[in-house]
Amino acid sequence: MAAAKAAAKTASPPEAGPDGGEGAEAPPARSRKKKLILLALPVLLLGGGAGVWFSGMLGGAAPPAQTAGEPAAGREAAENRQPVFIAMPDITANLNAPGRRGPFIRLRSQIEVAGPQDAAAVQAAMPRLVDLFTSYLREVRPEELRGSAGTHRLREELIARANVAAAPARVTDVLFTEILVQ
């Protein structure tokens, strides 16, 4: 009789309780994936938000700390430095166009530099600047100067040439007073 009771116990499957007790089966793989996604999603969102914050897009990046070798008065003087504007001589040049009587450009401009030291270097390089500007304008076609995009491209090219001509100085902008294409 004892043998029959032992056989009955081994033959019947263990019962699972409502709380997932001793005989409960392992949860399916699909449930595990959902839990992993639900836990990983907030972590990824927090990591992405922190990346955007520290990149400075949201204004969260702290200003750089003052170094020991840089005095505070010198840094404030550099930040309050006023730009200097230098008037360029009028430039008149023929444009690159086919035909007997080609169009020409008349350009009046000013150059913006960061300070008086750069202004002195630009003044010293003025003949080279006029030469570079004139030779560039002679290669420009009239179609390239149309619209605001043409004016912007012209400005960028002239800034690049001005920085080459006044090498130690840095030219920050070229401001057009007059552009006449005829």
Image (cartoon, rainbow, N blue to C red):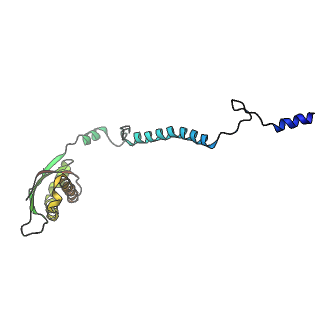
Quarter of the image for residue 72 reads top left
Q: Looking at the rendering, in which quadrant would you find the C terminus?
A: bottom left
Residue in front for this viewpoint, 161 or 103: 103
Residue 51 is left or right of residue 27, and the answer is: left
Report the residue at 81% width, 36% height from top: 12
- Residue extending furthest toward the left: 101
Report the residue at 19% width, 43% height from top: 82
Q: Looking at the rendering, in which quadrant would you find the N terminus?
A: top right
Residue in front for this viewpoint, 142 or 17: 17
Residue in front for this viewpoint, 42 or 58: 42
Report x, y in % for residue 27.
Answer: 65, 39
Residue 122 is left or right of residue 36, and the answer is: left
Report the residue at 17% width, 53% height from top: 147
Report x, y in % for residue 132.
Answer: 17, 62
Quarter of the image for residue 140 reads bottom left
Residue in front for this viewpoint, 25 or 75: 25
Report x, y in % for residue 50.
Answer: 44, 39
Report the residue at 38% width, 37% height from top: 60
Can you say whether 179 is above or below 103 in the image? Answer: above
Total marks placed = 0
- Residue extending furthest toward the right: 1
